[in-house]
Amino acid sequence: MVKREPKKVLLRLDPAVHEALAKWAADDLRSINAQIEFALRMALKQAGREPNRLSGPSVPD
């Protein structure tokens, strides 16, 4: 199986959003990057816009 290289994205956040995200990530024992991806996957699932195949940790129902 070939590992796909993750896309790199520059992201600008409001400092208060970053702080809240950092606290959430720490509570879940994740990096901020992993927490952003987790939140995006949850949003995609909720919006019914999941890609056909998502690699990595699953999003809870």
Image: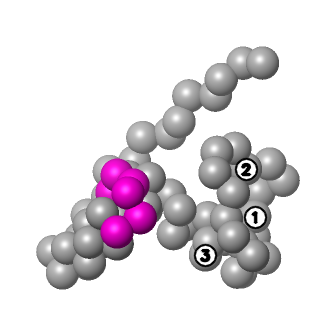
Where does the C terminus fall, quadrant-wise? bottom right
The dot on residue 54 is 2
Does the stretch in magenta take in 31? yes
Q: Which mark is residue 17?
A: none
Q: Is residue 45 left or right of residue 36?
A: right
Which region of the structure is painted magenta?
27-32
Determine whether 6 is above or below 22 in the image.
Answer: above
- Is any part of residue 7 visible from this angle? yes
Category of crowding for the residue at label 1, using alpha-carbon neighbours closer than 10 angstroms: few (below 14), some (14–19), many (at least 20): some
- Residue type at numbered disc 1: Glu
| Distance of label 2 from label 1 (alpha carbons) | 8 Å
To which residue does mark 3 refer? 43
The reply to whether discs 2 and 1 touch (Cβ–Cβ < 8 Å) is: yes
Tell me which label, 2 or 3, sits earlier in the chain.
3
Q: Is residue 33 left or right of residue 17?
A: right
> Are the residues flagged by discs 1 and 3 in contact, CB closer than 8 Å?
no
- Image side of residue 32 versus residue 60, left or right: left
